Image: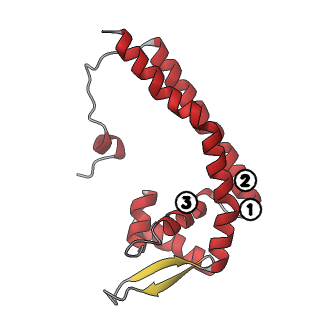
Amino acid sequence: MKMSLYQSDVEYQSEARSLSEAEYAALAHFRHALRRFTAFSDEMLGDAGLGPRRYQALLAIRAAAGGSGFSVGDLADVLIIKPNTAAELANRLEDAGLIRRVRDLRDRRRALLELTDEGARRLDQVAHVHFAKLQESRAVFMNLFTSREEAASGSD
């Protein structure tokens, strides 16, 4: 039986301690910050002619550029999607001229994904803005952990 993402990442504890009011507030603030970032990102990517999934795929391929290659299976793993969905996404990116498939020199049965010049250009257009927005929002994300640590130390 396949485990869900929740089951594989977090062991559910039915009798875990209750969160404090400050921890609930920190989680709510964090979720709001994530939602604001996602809304900003979706709008920006729409204006740039890329959707969130295309952007995530280009970003993952670019991030793996220094490694040993990036396959459709790797894309499925990183985006947490089914392999056939990753293959369809790779086909759409290739049709749009954003990526190309190249033969893996170590395993000629396998194709690797790499950005085209156009794909790299389009990714560069939006990635630096996303990074700057995350830097700007860093305090929100860091405050979640600070608030939780303070709440935990206050309960000793």
What's under tag 3, amino acid-wise? Gln
Place residue 92 in its image quadrant. Answer: bottom right
Q: Name the residue located 46 percent from the left edge and 58 percent from the top edge.
A: 79
**Mark 3 sits on what residue?**
56
Gap in angstroms between the C-alphas marked 2 and 1:
6 Å
The x and y percentages for residue 123 are 64, 66
At x 66% / y 45%, what residue is drawn?
133
**Residue projecting furthest to the right:** 47
Dots 2, 1 in contact, CB < 8 A: yes
What is the distance, in whole Å, between disc 2 and disc 3 at their CAs? 13 Å
Q: Is residue 19 visible?
A: no
Tag 2: amino acid: Met
User: Is there CB contact under 8 Å for labels 2 and 3?
Assistant: no
**In this rendering, is residue 100 above or below 59?**
below
Image quadrant holding the C terminus, namely top left
Q: Is residue 100 above or below residue 74?
A: below
Question: As drawn, is 152 to the left or to the right of 116?
Answer: left
Callout 1: SS: loop
Q: Which residue is mark 2?
A: 44
**For residue 116, what is the image quadrant?**
bottom right
